């Protein structure tokens, strides 16, 4: 377990400091929604 904590903290630090690149401004003003959505039915017996 302790061996997993250090790499996890390193990953969190890299994502927190913008390791994926510089922030980019939106291309159009307004609100945009992107992503995926799923709808399903779960039956419980």
Image (cartoon, grey):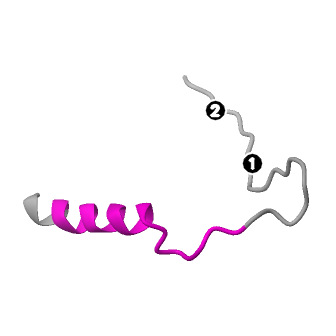
Sequence-first disc among 2 and 1: 1
Residue 28, percent from left and from top = 91, 61
Quarter of the rendering occupied by the C terminus: top right
As helix, strand or loop, the secondary structure at mark 1 comes to: loop
Position of 16 with respect to 9 (left or right) is: right
Which residue is the site of mark 2? 42
Q: Residue at x 18, y 59 (%)?
A: 5
Q: Residue at x 80, y 62 (%)?
A: 26
As helix, strand or loop, the secondary structure at mark 2 comes to: loop
Magenta-drawn stretch contains 6: yes
**In the depicted view, which residue is nearer to us: 34 or 21?**
21
Q: Which residues are magenta?
A: 5-24
Q: Residues within 10 Å of mark 1 (few under 14, many from 20)?
A: few
Quarter of the rendering occupied by the N terminus: bottom left
Residue 45 vertical placement versus 15 (above, below)? above
Main secondary structure along the magenta-highlighted residues: helix
Which residue is the site of mark 1? 37
Q: Residues within 10 Å of mark 2 (few under 14, many from 20)?
A: few
């Amino acid at each position: 377990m302790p061996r997993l904590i250090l790499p996890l903290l390193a990953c969190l630090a890299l994502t927190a400091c913008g390791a994926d690149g510089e922030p980019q401004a939106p291309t159009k003003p307004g609100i945009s929604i992107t992503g995926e959505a799923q709808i399903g039915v779960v039956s419980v017996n």
